[in-house]
Image (spheres, rainbow, N blue to C red):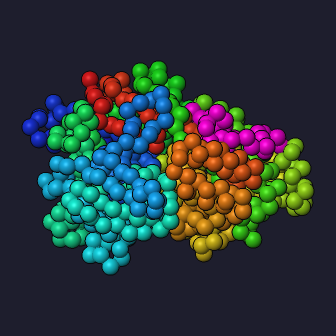
Amino acid sequence: MRIGRRKSMLAGLALAVPGKARAEAKILRVAMTAADIPLTTGQASQGGEGVRFMGVTAYDALINWDLSRADVAATLRPGLALSWSVDTNRKTAWTFRLRDGVTFHDGSRFTANAVVWNLDKLMRRDAPQFDQAQATQAATWTKSIARYSAIDPLTVAIETPEPNANLPYDMASIFMSSPAQWEEMGKDWNQVATRPSGTGPWKVTKVVPRERVEFVRNASYWDAARIPKCDGLVIIPMPDAVTRVAALLNGQIDWVEAPAPDTLGQLRQAGMQIVLNRYPHVWPYLLSCLPDSPFRDIRVRKAMNLAIDRDGICGLLSKTAMPAKGLVPPGHPWFGSPTFDIRYDPAAARALLAGAGFGPNNRCQATFLISTSGSGQMQPLPMNEAIKESLEDVGFAITLKAMDWEALRARRRAGAAAPENRGGHALNNSFGTADPTAFLGFSWSKLVPPIGTNWGFFKDNEADALCEAISVAFDLEEQNVLMAKLHTRIVDQAMWCFVVHDLNPRALAPRVKGFVQAQSWQQDLTPVELV
């Protein structure tokens, strides 16, 4: 969208808040990096950003993340379920005790039957309410569910196909939408998308595809401590970083995701707040290990890791990132003790490429699938161009194939072996690393697409054995030890090319107060005030 058209649209923004004059209403206006609004019906699209501004705003899961602190990593807490437990003998049977008295935005009750209905919409293709769009977004998490049933109005039983200690993490990403609203809207998800109904702290009031979603505070939200301080919220897709910054400086926006790094000084000088914090994020290249890929050879994978000047990339980003030495940084309980030290060593990279049969007259040809913007993608175009230059300096010949963020996510879900990915040898997709489920999805050979995120078909017997052990480690200390061993193996095998960890920069107008930047992909907008 051209800047002129975007300015015109922003100038016309007005949100109707019941009981308040337009001038009195306090409306938080947020500019997203995505090119379109997230899916509004429950399972948000647009990656972590979609969940951040649609999933946890309009909806709840049975288990939520505690986003109340900036000084510690976010942890799980009760959401629509007050408690959950696993049968200590069977270890595949889970019981969820639900919160009483919760209602959807349309006034209908949240019960165990609503949970079953929502799982049916994602998993039962013969269910009237089955929705392929939502099922696609939720597939990563529903794969661990075999059966489910309502025991009584406030109790749900869920069975996993095999022991799975990580089910609670999966349940934190499955959001509950209203069965009654689906009925009211003619049993048509396209209609529900225009008037969705969840249980979350914000109610959707208006949806304009590719332009904005408007919300008002849910004054009767079940968690009184999280009733929003603002009267309303508007989220606006704005993929161009320069446009986002201009809108903030012009007073048309209050909040900008991922401001352009070279504008941070200007923003600070203008009185804007620049907020940073580490969170469980890695910006990598997923590497194909298929027969037609040069990255099938561990020497080539290691060469790529050694060819990148990560300090230079962090400088390009105005120090809003930190160099990566794996999926998590050194000092993390899961880092372990890898023997492969990921660093900038172009001479070692050239030697590894030479050992793999590449040289000045036989450069290592590779095609990278990248995005133009997107959740957690930081500044993908300049970053990829800088990395391309570093790689070609040591003997690679890189072709960058750029596409929209949702198109790239579809390519990632399809896997490297899919016809549409033929000729693609690496895919640049940022990921969250907050829970063991993510690690297993990346590295377990049985979790290739479409059921997992092992895009490149990485297979390593030692990693597989560790993944198996982690999946049945219900003791947290035991699981942490195994996770450190798995991460050690992942790094030593150079499973991916690990580049940086984002420090999650966002720019806020001076009048935005009360925001706590959690160490999470998700953020809580309910304590935010406009003064």
**Quadrant of the image occupied by residue 134:** bottom left
Q: Is residue 215 above or below residue 179?
A: above
Residue at the far left in the pictured view:
19
Q: Is residue 232 above or below residue 166?
A: above
Image-based side of 326 in relation to 196, left or right: right
Q: Residue at x 41, y 57 (%)?
A: 87
Q: Kindly tell me whether residue 239 is visible in this rendering.
A: no
Q: Is residue 229 above or below residue 59?
A: above
**Quadrant of the image occupied by residue 137:** bottom left
Residue in front for this viewpoint, 264 or 226: 226
User: Where residue 103 sits: x, y (%)?
Assistant: 18, 51
How many numbered dots are placed on residues in this image? 0
Q: Residue at x 19, y 53 (%)?
A: 104
Kindly report the secondary structure that dominates the magenta region of the rendered protein.
loop
Image-based side of 22 in relation to 382, left or right: left
| Magenta highlight on residue 86 | no
| Magenta highlight on residue 343 | yes
Residue in front for this viewpoint, 91 or 397: 91
Residue range in magenta is: 320-346
Residue in front for this viewpoint, 354 or 255: 354
Residue at the far front in the pictured view:
89
Q: Residue at x 35, y 38 (%)?
A: 524
User: Where residue 139 sits: x, y (%)?
Assistant: 45, 64
Q: What is the quadrant of the C terminus in the image?
A: top left
Q: Kindly tell me whether residue 480 is visible in this rendering.
A: yes
Q: Residue at x 39, y 38 (%)?
A: 66
User: Where residue 54 sits: x, y (%)?
Assistant: 34, 49
Image-based side of 175 in relation to 353, left or right: left
